[in-house]
Image: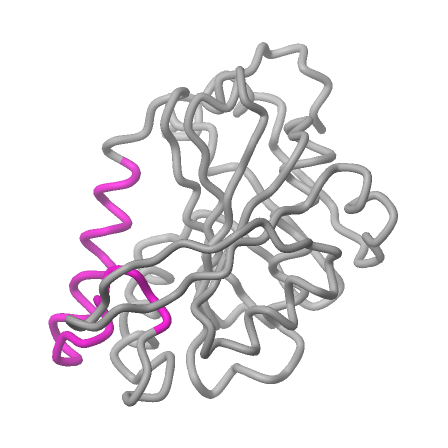
Amino acid sequence: MLTDHWPLLGLRLTTPRLELHLPTDDELAALAELAAEGVHEPERMPFLVPWTDLPPAQRARSVVQHHWLRRGNWSPDDWALNLAVLENGRAVGLQTLAARDFAVLRQVSTGSWLGTRHQRQGIGTEMRAAVLHLAFAGLDATEARSGAFEDNPSSFAVSRKHGYQPDGIARHVVRGRPVTERRLRLTRERWQARCSVPVTLDGLAPCLPMFGLPADNGGQ
């Protein structure tokens, strides 16, 4: 079976409302179509790489190509787990957990997007909770980092709920204009004090070496 060679295909994160896993081909197509419909207001750009400025058909294709690229470039020292977020079996968005030199630094970062019609329903908070549980409870991370541009209050609201704290700023150029990113950091201790969403991990043990960890790391 393919999971024998790519065990990440068997990894499942489950919350009361959601399931997160690597998308099947049909689910990847659904994510592409969701992105083509739109994921934010056109007057603002929440992403450092403005992929959502592409025309709908190209935007959809970029989702597929990026997913294939990150799978193909995966290494234990540099990985990005792009998980489809499903509610009642329907793809509603994408949640990423990424790291470099994780075995040494024990530090992860997160990123995500939701289809416009699925926003402001609490899904963003729950899907972030799922990958934070994977990071801290499953992979024994010590801290998680995130960040957002100043005009993205919904992202900051999700981070506040999980206990992130300010961690400085960074300046970027997006759409030819300067923007300020406010960086955020969550320690294991603050996560343990705040985590309230129940999360179940399935299929993690055979995946541990792919994250740069020994098979007996203790993950679920």
- Number of numbered markers: 0
Was residue 53 drawn as part of the magenta stretch in this picture?
Answer: yes
Residue 207 horizontal side relative to residue 126, left or right: left
Q: Nearer the viewer, residue 185 or 13?
A: 185
Q: Give the magenta part as a residue range.
A: 46-71
Identified at 45% across, 40% down, the residue is 98
| Most frequent secondary structure within the magenta stretch | helix
Q: Position of residue 10 (x, y in %)?
A: 52, 37
Q: Position of residue 119 (x, y in %)?
A: 53, 82
Q: Which of the 4 quarters of the picture holds residue 43? A: bottom left
Residue 144 horizontal side relative to residue 173, left or right: right
Residue occupying the far right of the picture? 193
Residue 111 horizontal side relative to residue 37, left or right: right
Q: Position of residue 23 (x, y in %)?
A: 40, 53
Identified at 43% across, 84% down, the residue is 116
Identified at 52% across, 82% down, the residue is 118
Is residue 207 shown above or below 148?
A: above
Q: Position of residue 187 (x, y in %)?
A: 71, 40
Q: Nearer the viewer, residue 137 or 142?
A: 142
Residue 202 horizontal side relative to residue 207, left or right: right
Is residue 194 shown above or below 113?
A: above
Q: Which of the 4 quarters of the picture holds residue 31? A: bottom left
Quadrant housing the N terminus: top left
Is residue 174 shown above or below 139?
A: below
Q: Which of the 4 quarters of the picture holds residue 159? A: bottom right
Quadrant housing the C terminus: top right
Q: Nearer the viewer, residue 165 or 199?
A: 165
Identified at 45% across, 33% down, the residue is 99
Is residue 53 shown above or below 50?
A: below
